[in-house]
Amino acid sequence: DRFFNNILMLRSGLSLYDGAIQPVFMDGNVFTKGTTFSRHEKNPTVQPDFDPAITLVQRPDGWYLEFKINPAWGRDKPWSVIDSKKLGLALTPKLPFEKPDGTPYRLDKDYFGHKRNAVNCFPGPFASPNQENLSLKVWPRSGL
């Protein structure tokens, strides 16, 4: 398993991997209030008092993910774009992670398709948030 450049929120964490038998790879993850990091984590950002106050809100036009971030996460250390080289080789076939057409992965776009900063990629699924309080429409209104 591989975990790179994630923001962990709420009662989650990676400490359950401490006793993993198979190799696990972790680097550059952010751990907020109520989350735990693993001994395998190479370079964690740990903020045990930071409450992201995450909520999912339904509005007439869709669903919004609302939460707080710390803009310093994008400034305090370099974050690299995740690519096939960083992911390494898959355990069983000992082959690189690649797209169906055989080209290497380069995860240089965020959830919305916005280009990530190639020199210092902000952790998490959203590129370069420029404010502390985010309200992001993540799903359109359902016809249900």
Image (cartoon, rainbow, N blue to C red):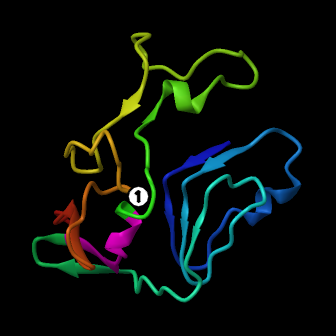
Q: Position of residue 91 (x, y in %)?
A: 74, 25
Q: Is residue 52 above or below residue 114?
A: below
Q: Which residue is mark 1?
A: 124
Which residue is pictured at 57% across the width and 32% down the height? 87
Q: Residue furthest top?
A: 102
Q: Position of residue 17 (x, y in %)?
A: 78, 56
Q: Please state which of residues 125 and 100 is positioned toward the viewer in this rendering.
A: 125
Which residue is pictured at 37% across the width and 76% down the height? 70
Image quadrant where one finds the N terminus: top right
Q: Please state which of residues 15 and 60 is positioned toward the viewer in this rendering.
A: 15
Mark 1 Cα shell of 10 Å, populated few (<14), some (14-19), many (≥20): some
Quadrant in which residue 15 is drawn = bottom right
70 in the magenta segment? yes
25 in the magenta segment? no
Image quadrant where one finds the C terminus: bottom left
Quadrant in which residue 94 is drawn = top right
Q: Is residue 138 above or below residue 27?
A: below
Q: Position of residue 48 (x, y in %)?
A: 59, 83
Which residue is pictured at 42% across the width and 25% down the height? 105
Which residue is pictured at 40% across the width and 86% down the height? 53
In terms of secondary structure, where does tag 1 sit? loop
Q: Is residue 107 above or below residue 111?
A: above
Question: Position of 10 compared to 54: left or right?
Answer: right
Amino acid type of the residue that numbered disc 1 sits on in the rendered structure? Gly
Q: How many marks?
A: 1
Q: Position of residue 5 (x, y in %)?
A: 49, 53
Chain part drawn in magenta: 63-73
